Image (cartoon, rainbow, N blue to C red):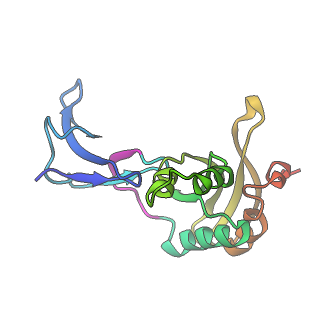
Amino acid sequence: MAIEYVNRKQKTYYLHAGKTKTGKPKYFFSMKAEGTLVETIPEGYEIYENPNAQVFLRKVQPRVITPEEVAIVREGVKRVAKLDYFMVDVKGKRIVVYLCDQNVDVLMDLVTSSPRRDAGTVDRLTQSFTYSPMMQFVLVDEETREFEVERWCFRGSVDDWLGLDSSTDLKALVKQYGRHLGKESFYELTPW
């Protein structure tokens, strides 16, 4: 039986195998159920779904961030920023917080006031949301568990991460900086 994966948008993907120009095996997901389908995940690989629901097969990533640290960020952002629609993803030594690109309040008001909505309307709407990285907590010292908090900078030619602060107290960093996510005060956060 072929490897199937259903992403958060409820779309089914099938794992396919192919070859590179040099003859090495390559793997990819497609919504097509025909072709050279793979029946087992190759050793050393894992399925990865990014915050925008794209599905990949990638080499197993080393785990340097603990599940407890991810929970601190996820629960802290929910509590201090009072956000319902955000994603947290781990990339190497980074815990990245993604915010919804759409104005959720306006869309939810439109959907809930519509006479044509059905039971699945809100689910279909939330499945269509896209997300962008806004803040990250970077592990800078594995021994002391010191993290640096960075926010995405939107200054035209500077589109990059902007370092704000660092601490061995991840909860304190999330509390101090996470409350600005989704608010105008976010754009005022600077290291100077």
Residue 159: in magenta span: no
Which quadrant of the view contains residue 79? bottom right
**Furthest residue to the left?**
1
User: With respect to residue 21, does 36 lie above or below?
Assistant: below
**Front-most of residues 127 and 62:** 127
Residue stretch in magenta: 54-63
Coordinates of residue 111 in the picture (x, y in percent) = 58, 52
**Front-most of residues 141 and 2:** 2
**Front-most of residues 146 and 174:** 174
Residue at the (26%, 55%) spot, across then down: 44
Q: Decide if residue 128 is on the left or right side of residue 144.
A: left
Coordinates of residue 38 in the picture (x, y in percent) = 15, 46
Q: Decide if residue 136 is on the left or right side of residue 175.
A: left
Residue 57: in magenta span: yes
Q: Decide if residue 66 is on the left or right side of residue 12.
A: right
Coordinates of residue 184 in the picture (x, y in percent) = 82, 51
User: With respect to residue 155, does 186 lie above or below?
Assistant: below
**Front-most of residues 107 and 158:** 107
Tell me if residue 166 can be seen. Answer: yes
Tell me if residue 24 can be seen. Answer: no
